Image: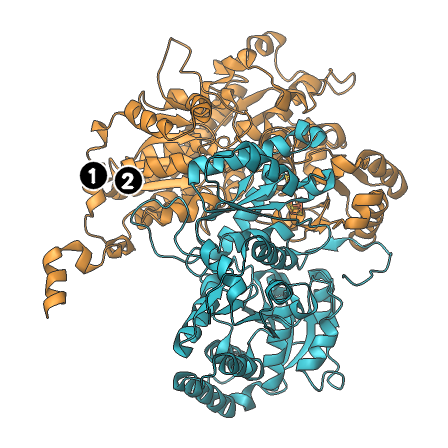
């Protein structure tokens, strides 16, 4: 449930959130041979494609049922069926992920019903799996669309077979392709079989093509998703997600798969919890490689803490990312003076208190449901040393003349948004080095003498 | 600086043979992959350029709705209205009435530039994105109250001269009356406030939104300020959006020629300029598609004639300047224009001589916009490159075949739902700038008025002209021709680069530009050379893929 909002009207200027079908499209792009289809006017799908494309620097196809004026009067059933038909003929997908838009939601199209009819009409021919998810943007943000699509996919496809399965399900939240690759490495090094949903590590960050790919290679297979009901356990990242109906909890309810709800593993604390859980689930010790990574990270903390200590940061983004980043920042002595999100779960502050024990005494502000004008106003008062979040904070960074460290989504004014590693000891190491160096560089640039030694 | 040279690659050898490819066969192969119904439809949009008689080229189907499930690059009516036409004006508060996404996605993504120091109040709201951010409550109970509050809030904080409101799809559906709200708020606040009914489902592409925006500007803004500025040759520039600073260069050129620019729709633009634009004596149209409506309406109401011009490429710029000078027929201007051309051309010719040998004969394809895919062909021609395939996302038939087909265009249901204003001569402000006979003959001093011949006559027979090209057709063309460069927008960008082919964004210019007039043309030549001849293309194949012996060596060692 969303927190009750006070009824005083307020416009949003420079939003710190995107709309739900974007999150859903991202998930469907992380399933093998799958095609996202937005049920509504073509503008939504064109806009969303553009946003995903400019972050990932990859082609992103999202189909639309192309509403017209008459469709808005008579309902979108016919258009949706034609769209599904044309997608099947052109792309031959194994899954079509249908997400609604504000328009079809307002009209009240019953997508599952329309598609059930469709399957009947088309009987005889093997049709792809169709997953539909309701994603009205007027109640929720892109992250709700993301989790909604993961859950709908699992709900539609996962089953319980009879095999003695030992694999682990991992629901990673909205991370970067580089993060997803790192996660896969970790599972591999643990010798633990896993199924990750979604997995856009290749579909949205792949090599050059030697020939045309109708749908980019990679992604979780439909077969794998089907076997998620057989897993030994599920892990899902996100302390906010832990409060919501999620895919992991659904599998627990339906098929009694134990579910570990953890924070996004950024920083030593949260990453330790993750490795611990993996060790427990698999019954294996943490591989030496990661023991070393952790060791190097702590060594770097010891060397660098004096440069970052007491620095002040403004953190913004999806609530779960904000919690992960804030947890990491505060463990190295940086005060995340402002933790802000366009999301509005009602749990942000609470969860921040869990990961930042001295939250109250530090005077940290946690703001939910805010836009960049609010964030800018608060930032100006809090005199931070840097901002950390997506490209969208650049306007504020420029106004207050402080550096912006780009993480999360969307990053459309730099290269390599898809290759930022945020998680694990290794990701934390990279964040730590980046942040320390930005702080050191600011001092260096401000000094009248051009020191080249620290 | 001399760019790093690259070796000749495999596909370049292939490029030389492109003339042997039969376009009809290529088309046939592409169409065969579609379901029959889709093929029938697409084949009318996918034409091989051919002159059928003195006046006409092969008919192309355009401005009809995209088929559900076929991925196109088109945007919606709202995108055309808010993002394209209204967006680049710095001192209007553009407020999106709808859920958050629509507004968010149109937030400063076009790299329009603006210089607020040239209007006295220095207002610049372009870096902002205002939205009513509708929530479930408003969808159920209506959003007019929230809209009112948002207008009030924007006014209180920024004290703008004008606020415009844009309706998104759900708004049309729940029946919010944005026009009565804006009227009420206009009365209350005493500034210009009005709304656009540009719900995304209207029309078939962003083109509908251009029309809606043109209507709005014409009804609510143009003509508000009658101050007549000094200047012998007063013009408006229509359809120039100042991407990458193009308009700055054009402004500078005009100034040197002694031409006074009253208003640009809409690049480096201000409401002040719009309000005053009816005092100009000539309208110049850059992007025909997005803005010809305003030009027509201004002619009817105020008596201002219009000319089609183009400032992309040196050749086109000189031609356009001469056309303007001829139109006025004033020797002072004619001489001044020649002087300016003479000053500019040596640098242009020098650059052409340098670049041409490196790019001569290479192929270009461009699919973008409603005029750019035409304009840029001339730039490529100046460095010896050949455009063999071009088309638009949201153009109409007249943009391809020329305005003489206008009477023949069928108006379908999708276009009918965009209002056509009934424009009459203004009883006080109508002032024919030229002789009635000239106006009727649509010609003055040998210069054709209101004339645009479209893209087809400027392309060779046998070239591809493709409307609303699909992803699949793009892929096939690339595979078949391996062009040296492909120009399009962000949505195609990475798919093309995935094939190891240089891609230039002609909507937002990547981070480059300006490319307009002479300086911009030179800039563009060098940039094409750097992109097409970049060394990165040498690394596409790993050594073991390039020569089998080598891979054998790796294997046995
Ligand atoms: S209508 Fe809804 S789904 Fe479409 S772009 Fe707007 S917010 Fe997103
Ligand atoms: S909801 Fe309508 S107006 Fe908004 S982006 Fe989608 S098509 Fe365009």
Q: Is the Cβ of the residue at disc 1 closer than 8 Å to that at disc 2? A: yes
| Location of the N terminus of chain A (image quadrant) | bottom right
Left or right relative to A331: residue B464: left
Q: Residues within 10 Å of mark 2 (few under 14, many from 20)?
A: many
Mark 1 or 2, nearer chain start: 1
SS of the residue at dot 1?
helix
SS of the residue at dot 2?
loop
Q: Quadrant of residue B517?
A: top left
Residue sitting at x 74%, y 76%: A350
Residue B114 versus residue B436 in the image, above or below: below
Residue named by callout 1 = B14
Q: Position of residue A232 (x, y in %)?
A: 52, 72
Q: Nearer the viewer, residue A358 or B347?
A: A358
- Marking on residue B296: none
Question: In the rendered image of this protein, which colour is used for chain B?
Answer: orange
Q: Is residue A381 visible?
A: no
Residue named by callout 2 = B482
Question: In the rendered image of this protein, which colour is used for chain A?
Answer: cyan
* Chain letter for mark 1: B
Residue B270 versus residue B133 in the image, above or below: above
Left or right relative to B458: residue B279: right
Question: Both on one chain, marks 1 and 2?
Answer: yes
Q: Is residue B280 visible?
A: yes
Whole-angstrom CA distance, mark 1 to mark 2, is: 8 Å
């Amino acid at each position: 449930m969303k927190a009750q909002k006070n009824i005083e009207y307020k416009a949003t200027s420079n939003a710190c959130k995107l709309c739900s079908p974007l999150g859903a499209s991202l998930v469907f792009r992380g399933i093998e041979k799958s095609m996202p289809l937005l049920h509504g006017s073509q503008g939504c799908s064109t806009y969303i494609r553009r946003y995903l494309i400019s972050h990932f620097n990859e082609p992103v196809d999202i189909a639309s049922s192309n509403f017209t004026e008459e469709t808005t009067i008579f309902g979108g059933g016919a258009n949706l069926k034609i769209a599904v038909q044309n997608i099947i003929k052109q792309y031959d997908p194994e899954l079509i992920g249908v997400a609604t838009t504000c328009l079809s939601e307002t009209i009240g199209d019953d997508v599952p019903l329309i598609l059930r009819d469709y399957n009947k009409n088309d009987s005889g021919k093997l049709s792809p799996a169709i997953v539909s998810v309701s994603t009205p943007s007027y109640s929720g943000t892109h992250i709700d669309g993301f989790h909604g699509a993961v859950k709908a996919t699992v709900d539609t496809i996962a089953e319980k077979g009879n095999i003695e399965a030992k694999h682990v399900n991992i629901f990673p939240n909205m991370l970067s392709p580089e993060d997803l690759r790192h996660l896969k490495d970790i599972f591999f090094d643990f010798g633990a079989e896993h199924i990750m949903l979604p997995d856009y590590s290749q579909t949205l960050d792949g090599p050059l093509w030697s020939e045309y790919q109708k749908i980019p290679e990679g992604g979780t297979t439909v077969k794998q998703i089907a076997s998620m009901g057989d897993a030994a356990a599920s892990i899902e990242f996100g302390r906010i997600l832990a409060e919501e109906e999620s895919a992991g909890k659904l599998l627990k309810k339906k098929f009694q798969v134990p579910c570990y709800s953890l924070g996004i593993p950024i920083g030593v604390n949260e990453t330790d919890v993750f490795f611990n859980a993996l060790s427990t689930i698999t019954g294996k010790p943490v591989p030496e490689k990661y023991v070393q990574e952790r060791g190097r990270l702590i060594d770097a903390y010891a060397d660098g803490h004096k440069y970052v200590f007491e620095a002040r940061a403004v953190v913004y983004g999806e609530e779960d990312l904000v919690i992960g980043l804030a947890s990491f920042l505060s463990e190295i002595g940086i005060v995340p003076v402002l933790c802000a999100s366009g999301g509005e779960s009602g749990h942000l502050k609470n969860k921040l208190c869990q990961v930042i024990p001295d939250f109250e005494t530090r005077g940290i502000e946690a703001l939910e449901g805010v836009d960049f004008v609010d964030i800018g106003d608060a930032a100006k008062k809090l005199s931070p040393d840097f901002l950390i979040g997506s490209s969208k904070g650049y306007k504020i960074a420029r106004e207050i003349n402080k550096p912006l460290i780009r993480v999360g989504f969307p990053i459309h004014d730099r290269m390599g948004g898809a290759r930022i590693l945020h998680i694990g000891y290794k990701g934390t190491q990279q964040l730590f080095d980046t942040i320390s160096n930005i702080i050191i560089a600011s001092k260096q640039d401000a000094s009248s003498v051009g020191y080249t030694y620290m | 600086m001399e760019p790093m040279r690259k070796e000749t690659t495999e596909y370049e050898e292939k490029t030389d043979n492109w003339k042997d490819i039969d376009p009809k066969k290529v088309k046939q192969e592409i169409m065969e992959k579609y379901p029959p119904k889709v093929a029938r439809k697409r084949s009318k949009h996918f034409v091989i350029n051919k002159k059928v008689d003195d006046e006409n080229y092969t008919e192309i189907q355009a401005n009809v709705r995209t088929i559900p499930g076929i991925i196109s690059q088109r945007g919606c009516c709202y995108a055309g209205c808010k993002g394209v036409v209204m967006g680049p004006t710095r001192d209007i508060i553009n407020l999106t009435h709808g859920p958050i996404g629509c507004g968010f996605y149109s937030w400063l993504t076009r790299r329009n530039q603006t210089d607020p120091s040239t209007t006295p109040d220095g207002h610049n709201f372009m870096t902002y994105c205002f939205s009513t951010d509708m929530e479930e409550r408003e969808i159920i109970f209506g959003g007019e109250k929230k809209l009112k509050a948002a207008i009030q809030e924007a006014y209180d904080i920024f004290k703008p001269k004008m606020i415009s409101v844009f309706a998104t799809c759900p708004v049309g559906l729940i029946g919010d009356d944005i026009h009565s709200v804006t009227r009420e708020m206009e009365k209350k606040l005493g500034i210009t406030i009005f709304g656009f009914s540009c719900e995304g489902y209207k029309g078939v592409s962003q083109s509908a939104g251009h029309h809606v925006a043109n209507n709005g500007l014409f009804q609510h803004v143009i003509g508000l300020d009658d101050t007549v500025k000094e200047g012998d040759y007063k013009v408006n520039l229509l359809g120039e959006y100042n991407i990458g600073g193009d308009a700055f260069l054009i402004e500078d050129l005009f100034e040197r020629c002694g031409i006074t620019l009253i208003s640009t729709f809409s690049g480096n633009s201000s409401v002040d300029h719009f309000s005053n634009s009816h005092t100009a004596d000539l309208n110049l149209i850059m992007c025909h598609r997005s803005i010809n409506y305003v030009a027509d309406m201004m002619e009817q109401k105020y008596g201002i004639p219009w000319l089609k011009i183009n400032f992309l490429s040196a050749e086109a710029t000189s031609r356009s300047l001469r056309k303007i000078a001829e139109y006025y027929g004033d020797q002072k201007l004619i001489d001044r224009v020649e002087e300016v051309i003479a000053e500019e051309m040596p640098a242009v010719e020098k650059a052409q001589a340098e670049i041409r040998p490196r790019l001569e004969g290479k192929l270009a394809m461009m699919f973008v916009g409603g005029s750019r895919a035409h304009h840029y062909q001339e730039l490529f021609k100046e460095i010896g490159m050949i455009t063999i395939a071009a088309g638009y996302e949201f153009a109409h038939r007249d943009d391809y075949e020329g305005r003489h087909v206008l009477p023949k265009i069928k108006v379908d249901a999708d276009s009918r739902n965009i209002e056509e204003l009934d424009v009459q001569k203004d009883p006080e402000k109508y002032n024919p700038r030229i002789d009635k006979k000239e106006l009727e003959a649509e010609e003055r001093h040998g210069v054709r008025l209101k004339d645009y011949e479209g893209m087809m006559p400027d392309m060779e027979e046998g070239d591809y002209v493709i409307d609303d090209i699909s992803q699949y057709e793009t892929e096939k063309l690339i595979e078949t021709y391996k062009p040296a460069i492909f120009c399009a927008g962000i949505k195609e960008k990475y798919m093309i680069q995935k094939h190891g082919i240089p891609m230039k964004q002609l909507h937002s210019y990547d981070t480059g530009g300006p490319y307009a007039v002479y300086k911009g043309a030179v800039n563009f030549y060098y940039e094409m050379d750097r992109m097409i001849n970049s060394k990165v293309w040498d690394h596409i194949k790993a050594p073991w893929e390039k020569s089998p012996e080598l891979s054998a060596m790796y294997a046995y060692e």
